[in-house]
Amino acid sequence: MTTPLAPDPEQLAAFDRDGLLILRGALDPKVRDSAAKAAGRLLATDRTAGRDRSVDGKDGFRGVVALDDAFLPLVANPAVLPTLIALLSPNIHLLSSNLISMPSLPDEQRTIRVPSRHGWHRDMSSTVTDLGVEHTPRLAIKVAYFLTDPGPDAGLTMFVPGSHTRTGPVSVPRGAIDPSGAITPDIGPYDAVLFENRTWHAGGLNRSGHERLAVMMQYGFRWLNAVDDPVPDLLDRPDLDDVERQLLGARDRHPDNSVAREGAGARPLTDWWEHLNAAPAR
């Protein structure tokens, strides 16, 4: 891995305040191009395993890091990883890697993102159901990479800054589809958007004339169950380093594969962080 920069304290404070953050230039152009081509290949197949289809022509796949090597460089992206560790801890892994394709639709053909189904939501809704919204902490952070060119009509994910601290839902006025204060992030093609599980968000309206492609990489504490299917074959690959293996779900094990103490599997990221930054992680 290339040597990354330590996280910016002002950016960490902005994430704590807003529940989201833009990291400029966090996506390598070659990785973006390769991932976009891989996305096109996957979407053109008739594969059903891991397929994630929904209303209004939404298409995609769960667990894309196991479906094409082009997505593997996103797992431990050194331009993003320090910020993730600083906001969560080194004891994290990848919960999901989700490819999303949204077509460009005329407004009259939409069945969601209309006043009767505005689409605003929080992630990990079952956690809120089990714990209650007042007791749901920051558990996970998604990193959104957009593989098609952004723009005002590209249908980028929208957010309500600061909504991660609310104990009730966002309020959408009657006849509208967006709450007061909703924003579309102003990003370039190589920027990444980070947001946490409690931040209210919704897909924007894609009126661009072409599909919107995005990859959402969600990271959370290692004691949270992964959303994607297990990827044991990936962990056996000799070309992965220990940090990547931790993020892909390596368990608490000694080198001989015997059981180690709880949390020992976070040692790769803990060591990596200590080499990067003298300040302890959260």
Image: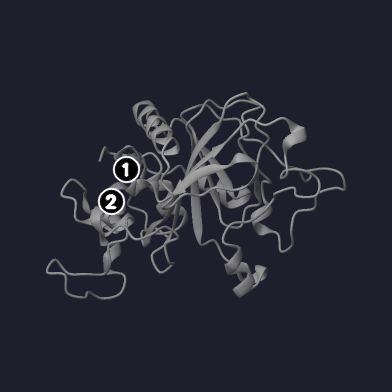
Would residue 102 appear left or right of 88 to someone viewing this image?
right
Answer above or below: position of 75 versus 147: below
Looking at the picture, which amino acid does disc 1 mark?
Leu
Spatial CA distance of label 2 from label 1 is 9 Å
Q: Which of 38 and 270 is in front in this view?
A: 38
Looking at the picture, which amino acid does disc 2 mark?
Glu
Q: Which residue is drawn at 51% across and 49% down?
A: 52
Answer above or below: position of 64 versus 37: below
- Local secondary structure at mark 2: helix
Answer above or below: position of 95 versus 26: below
The residue to which callout 1 is attached is 72
Say whether marks 2 and 1 touch (CB < 8 Å): yes
Q: Nearest to the eye among marks 2 and 1: give it.
A: 1
- Local secondary structure at mark 1: helix
Q: Residue 91 carries which label?
A: none
Q: Residue at x 62, y 23 (%)?
A: 209
Q: Quadrant of residue 264?
A: bottom left
Give coordinates of residue 269: x percent, y percent. 30, 55
**Residue 53 seen by the camera:** yes
Give coordinates of residue 224: x percent, y percent. 44, 67
Seen as rendered, the residue at the extreme left is 256
Q: Nearer the viewer, residue 211 or 226?
A: 211
Nearest to N terminus: mark 2 or mark 1: 1
Q: Which residue is drawn at 47% across and 49% down?
A: 51
The residue to which callout 2 is attached is 244
- The crowding category of the residue bearing disc 1, from other C-alpha atoms within 10 Å (few below 14, some 14 to 19, many at least 20), is some
